[in-house]
Image (tube, rainbow, N blue to C red):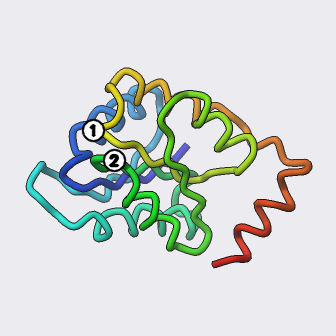
Amino acid sequence: MKISLGTDHAGFRYKEKVKAFLTEFGHEVKDLGTFSEEAVDYPVFIRPAAEAVARDECDRGIVFGGSGNGEAMAANKVRGARCALCWNEESARLSRQHNDANVLSIGQRMIPEDLALRIVCVWLETPFEGGRHEKRVAQLDAMC
């Protein structure tokens, strides 16, 4: 799977950990920055990660920040991106099963690193259920 990554300075450390984790498991990573913990404006790096998914250049995207809230908001401004802010394995599972989330947002200051890696794993492995959820996802996509 090809996965885009984007972060601000507050999520840089987790982005680097997740990038290594994804690469280790054979995923192709498109790292769109930032590339240090120097303060930056998150929309500059989150938008390209979401756009890569919306343009089908990447299968999925993962964005990071301090809380993950602003990053999810920025990603969801991109038509075709359905970004879910996840804080545990169940929220990650449901974001895929029910919402067909194609972008994941993680807050580095909100959860421990080991949980972040488990969330990524669950999110990548969980398929969309389709069925009754397809109509709702179509409604979401039509909103942008």
Where residue 134 sits, quadrant-wise, is bottom right
Neighbours of disc 2 within 10 Å: few (<14), some (14-19), many (20+): some
Q: Amino acid under label 2?
A: Ser
Q: Residue at x 68, y 38 (%)?
A: 94
Q: Taking 28 as reference, is 9 above or below it?
A: below
Residue annotated with mark 2? 67
Asked if residue 83 is positioned above or below residue 141 in the image, the reply reads above
Q: Is residue 109 left or right of residue 122?
A: left
Q: What is the three-letter code of the residue carrying label 1?
A: Arg
**In which quadrant of the rendered view does residue 54 lie?**
bottom right
Image quarter of the N terminus:
top right
Q: Earlier in the sequence, mark 1 or mark 2?
A: 2
Look at the numbered disc 1 and give the secondary structure of its residue.
Answer: loop
Q: Residues within 10 Å of mark 1 (few under 14, many from 20)?
A: some
**Quadrant hosting residue 129:** top right
- Horizontal and vertical percent for residue 51? 48, 69
Q: Nearer the viewer, residue 20 or 76?
A: 76
The numbered mark at residue 38 is: none
Is 118 positioned to the left or the right of 143 in the image?
A: left
The residue under label 1 is 109
Residue 5 in the image: x percent, y percent?
38, 51
Is 32 above or below relative to 84? below
Q: Residue at x 32, y 69 (%)?
A: 43
Q: Is residue 96 left or right of residue 89?
A: right
User: Marks 1 and 2, Cα distance to the nearest angstrom?
Assistant: 6 Å
In this rendered view, identify the residue nearer to me: 70 or 131: 70
